Image: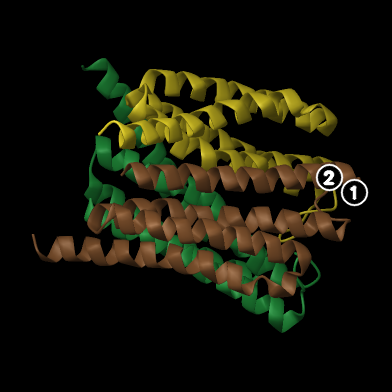
Chain colours: A green, B yellow, C brown
């Protein structure tokens, strides 16, 4: 499981870095809290952060479930794909939101595989015991 | 625990479906990323997604804690109530936000029972050991 | 682990209380769902809730990872610092968003220590086995 734990913590730290960029953009573009609109660059960085939060709520349980029923090594490898995909997502979204699809897919797919794998594993455990 | 794992993954997949509806509404109503306002239907679907995220952060640890100290079967059953309540919440909110209360209650209550049950179980474990 | 479980559930319940304040502000200031803007006080309470959600996604896995590799007692103690820091954050942000930094730091630091501790522990486990 240590590989899965490292990926879990890295995924959250990546999210925290995205949050730092939002905070820095608040300063740079004068978007005073509690506002979350008013500058296009700020809004892009904010959406990158929020979308990553939406992915983490699936990734983290998914990593755990897949590890438990199948392989923690495969789970960690899918987590690495997620981490790289998120970097691509953040990079492309910040430049042009219309080009965020590939990066999104590379984080969305691993997450769904982990979750669906978890369901399959749990159903199998119920059937064969 | 398999029942709890299935409910956990289903709750996240339900959230993902709500996210798909937001993405579809972006296209249909021309709400270009990173905007999150500008069309009433889009905003309702967006709030359904966000509110579900707020519930998942309580539901998932709650399922685990309640299972650990009490019963994974009761936890999974409360999770099923949550899943159905969320469907009702999403259905009613999309039609009329003022009517979202019943669906909200049916997801909020199971989540709070799971969490408070977890605290009671943990305190009991500390006292009786 | 019971101390960690209690802190986990309390952190979510604290978040739920922040959510109640948002719901109450909706009524008081006439910010009809699905709107999330239009009144400064509402927006502050909404951002307190959202920022707390962003912290919980790191705190909860962090508590678990740190407990596993180091000490559940230290993890729970860091969690208590988080809980108090969040109260300070919410209190100061609601009055003046510019003064939210100290409270933010008192929740951000424990979360990062828990996560980085988790990575260090996992790497050590890989190296020494």
Single out the residue that lies furthest toward the bottom: A28
Give the image location of residue A49, x and y in percent. Answer: 59, 62
| Residue C65 numbered tag | none
Q: Picture quarter containing residue A48? A: bottom right
Would you place residue B10 above or below residue C3 in this image?
Answer: above
Q: Residue at x 83, y 58 (%)?
A: C41
Q: Residue at x 65, y 54 (%)?
A: C50
**How far is disc 1 from disc 2 in space, using C-alphas?**
6 Å
Q: Could you tell me if residue B17 is visible in this image?
A: yes
Number of dots carrying numbers: 2
Tell me if label 1 and label 2 are in contact, CB under 8 Å.
Answer: yes
SS for callout 2: helix
Would you place residue A13 above or below residue B36 in this image?
Answer: below
Give the image location of residue A26, x and y in percent. Answer: 70, 76
Which quadrant of the figure contains the N terminus of chain B? top left
Which quadrant of the figure contains the C terminus of chain B? top left
Chain of residue at mark 2: C
| Residue C29 numbered tag | 1
Chain of residue at mark 1: C
Q: Residue at x 50, y 25 (%)?
A: B79
Q: Residues within 10 Å of mark 2 (few under 14, many from 20)?
A: many
Would you place residue C51 above or below residue B83 in this image?
Answer: below
Q: Could you tell me if residue A104 is visible in this image?
A: no
Give the image location of residue C118, x and y in percent. Answer: 30, 61
Q: Residue at x 59, y 55 (%)?
A: C52
SS for callout 1: helix
Single out the residue that lies furthest toward the right: C30
List the residue tagged with mark 2.
C26
Give the image location of residue A71, x and y in percent. Answer: 23, 43
């Amino acid at each position: 499981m240590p590989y899965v734990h490292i990926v879990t913590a890295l995924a959250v730290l990546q999210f925290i870095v995205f949050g730092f960029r939002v905070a820095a953009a608040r300063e740079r573009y004068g978007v005073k809290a509690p506002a979350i609109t008013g500058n296009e660059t700020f809004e892009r960085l904010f959406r990158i952060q929020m979308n990553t939060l939406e992915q983490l709520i699936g990734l983290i349980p998914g990593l755990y479930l897949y590890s438990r029923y199948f392989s923690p090594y495969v789970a960690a490898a899918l987590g690495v794909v997620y981490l790289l995909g998120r970097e691509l997502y953040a990079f492309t979204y910040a430049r042009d939101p219309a080009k965020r699809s590939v990066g999104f897919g590379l984080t969305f797919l691993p997450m769904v595989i982990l979750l669906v794998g978890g369901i399959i594993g749990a159903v199998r455990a119920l059937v064969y015991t």
